[in-house]
Structures are given as C-alpha cells and as structure tokens.
Amino acid sequence: MLELRTVESDDWPIWRELRQAALAEAPYAFGSTLAQWQGAGDREDRWRARLEIPGAHNVVAVVDGRPAGMASGVPVEHAEDSVELISMWVSPAARGRGVGDGLIREVARWAAERGAKSLRLSVMPDNKRAAALYERHRFTDTGVPGDLLPDGTGHEQVMAKDLTNS
C-alpha cells in the first residue's frame, strides 16, 4: 500500500535515508553527489535546513511500511506562479508500482493549491525512464536549456506542466 507523507525538519532522518540512497543508486540524476552529503556534509543541521527551504512541500512515499521515494516542490524565484519539482526519486524496488505517479500528483496538487500556474523540473537528457514518467503526467520540453551537465557536454532538459488545466 502506498502512503504519501509530508515531511518537515523533524523528519530529517527519513529524508536523509532516502536522499543518500538516491545519490548512491542514481548519481547521474542529481546535481549533488553522495560525497557531498556524507562525512562532514552529513550533519543534522544541514538535513534540517534542506527541509526548511521557505515555501517548500517535501513528500516521502512509504510502501508496505518502508520508505520508497521522495520529492519536493519549491517556489521558483522571480516567478511566483511557478513551482519546481526537485529531489524526485523512487527506489528501484518500488518502481513500476505507482510511487512516482503519486509523488508527482501530490506535488502538482500542492502547487495548484498555492496558485501556481506551472510545475517545472529538470531531468538529465539520458534519463529516459524519468522523462517518460514526466511525459505521462503531461510535462513537455520547454526548449530552454537547463544547467550545464557535469561533463560540460550538454544541458539538463527542462520540462513543464500547465497546472491551469489540471
């Protein structure tokens, strides 16, 4: 059974568990690295601060009592009518079970409730499975290049979903 939970700074241990698992399992999918969130970077105050991003909505998915995925919606600076979907990840054992769908729907619901007209995200261009998930939820390529890839050879793909017709 899938359960979605909104998490706050006191829930940092579950966010830590999921984020470190995500960075270990899919390092290609994120702008930060596991090394940055281990050792000296693995501090309670840092995890709490991540969950205290102003205006953010942080969600974890729990399947059969075990943490199985995560996502956040954060307001976009200088674009009050837009929210960005970040930190999206589903554990390999939970893929294909509707976890990603649930996380996206929850962040989109929250974004629309706060008056956002669009939900956007960035995805690595070779992450075809994630892009297919986003396309199923009516995200489309904006044509705007995202951040430069770590190897300097290209950019993240920026996708957006219109929330006014949801």
Image: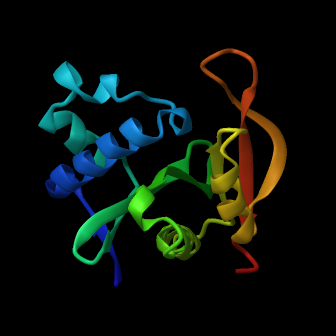
Most extreme residue toward the bottom is 1
Most extreme residue toward the right is 143
Q: Nearer the viewer, residue 28 or 36?
A: 28
Most extreme residue toward the front is 93
Q: Quadrant of the N terminus?
A: bottom left
Question: Taking 156 as reference, is 44 left or right?
Answer: left
Q: Tell me what residue is drawn at x 22 percent, y 75 percent.
A: 65
Q: Tell me what residue is drawn at x 63 percent, y 54 percent.
A: 130
Residue 8, relative to residue 65: is it above or below? above
Question: Taking 8 as reference, is 69 left or right?
Answer: right
Give x and y (percent) for residue 158: 72, 44
Question: Taking 126 as reference, is 104 left or right?
Answer: left
Q: Quadrant of the C terminus?
A: bottom right
Say if residue 48 shows up in the picture.
yes
Q: What is the quadrant of residue 94 in the picture?
A: bottom left
Q: Tell me what residue is drawn at x 40 percent, y 62 percent.
A: 93
Q: Nearer the viewer, residue 75 or 46?
A: 46
Q: Nearer the viewer, residue 74 or 25?
A: 25
Give x and y (percent) for residue 44: 13, 38
Q: What is the quadrant of residue 35 in the picture?
A: top left
Give x and y (percent) for residue 73: 48, 57
Say if residue 52 shows up in the picture.
no
Question: Taking 86 as reference, is 122 left or right?
Answer: right
Q: Tell me what residue is drawn at x 49 percent, y 65 percent.
A: 95
